[in-house]
Amino acid sequence: MAQAVLFWSFGGLAALLALLVIVLPNPVHCAVALIGNLFCLAALFAMLQAHFLAAVQVLLYAGAILVLFLFVIMLLNLSRQELGRPRQTAAKIAGTLLLGWFGFHLAWRLATLPGESFPAPAAGYGTLEQVGGLLFGPMVLPFEVASVLLVAAVLGAVAIAKRRLW
Amino acid sequence: MIGLGHYLGLSAILFTLGAVGVVVRRNALVILMSVELMLNAANLALLGFARQFNDATGHGLAVFVMTVAAAEAAVGLALVLNVFRRRGTVKVDEMRTLRG
């Protein structure tokens, strides 16, 4: 019962904040709504017994990626003309309606799937120990490749954003 | 009771909102934020399946999704910054040099 109340409140709030992200005209407001959305998702991750992922979600997304977004928004210092309302073309409205119809139909079909609640989690499920054992055990090669990807992304970002490299 | 279907439904809703944001918004920063929304919806589905089948592989995949999201945000924001410096705009409609 408590599970249902928490799911509907955090899920509803996450959907509402996601809607705000795509309708608010000012990117700063969008970024703040996105932070709220990510916190709600962290709560949902914790309800799925993914405690480590919930902590990483708060630390990495809300703490690092969104700060990066806010920094860039402040650096750009957008004018009022840049922030103007988007033009509504017929193609955009048609695309939105089509995507919305498809998405909500899909969501409705998934949410009404016959199925009972989750099975009891195994001992130690979702702990740092288990996820760490997974990352440094069977997934060690993708894990190392991910670190190479991060280095490449950081070097690429610096090379793109710097005015003159040397 | 709340089961896998509810989490998948919420994930589909969040993914749709992100996709609509990419289609509708013309501000490159908000488009990047909508992409983050979609990646997070995928993470929610991964963790829901992991919980249903008591298999932590989904957690490892979610960690990789977050890594890729961080890399994508860093490179994407650097591109937006550079385009703004050269063209004075972040609207994707006005970045049309390659469109011919």
Image (tube, rainbow, N blue to C red):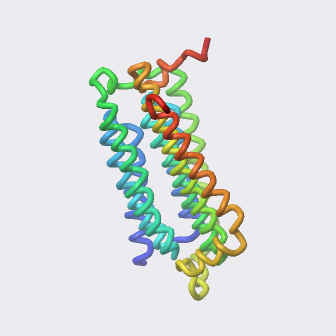
Residue A101 is situated, as x and y percent measured from the top left of the image, at: 56, 40
| Relative vertical location of residue A161 with respect to residue A84 in this rendering, above or below | below
Residue A145 is situated, as x and y percent measured from the top left of the image, at: 67, 57
| Relative vertical location of residue A166 with respect to residue B64 in this rendering, above or below | above
Q: Quadrant of the N terminus of chain A?
A: bottom left
| Relative vertical location of residue A91 with respect to residue A37 in this rendering, above or below | above
The residue at the point 60 percent across, 80 percent down is A130
Q: Going by the picture, which residue comes out furthest to the bottom?
A: A123
Specify the quadrant of the image occupied by residue B41: bottom right
On the question of residue A112 being in view, the answer is no
The residue at the point 59 percent across, 75 percent down is A132
The residue at the point 37 percent across, 39 percent down is A72
Residue A80 is situated, as x and y percent measured from the top left of the image, at: 27, 24
The residue at the point 38 percent across, 58 percent down is A63
Q: Nearer the viewer, residue A118 or A32?
A: A32
Residue A117 is situated, as x and y percent measured from the top left of the image, at: 57, 76
On the question of residue A136 being in view, the answer is yes
Q: Going by the picture, which residue comes out furthest to the top?
A: B100
Q: Nearer the viewer, residue A138 or A91?
A: A138
Q: Going by the picture, which residue comes out furthest to the front?
A: A166
Q: How many marks?
A: 0
* Lateral position of residue B53 relative to residue A80, left or right: right
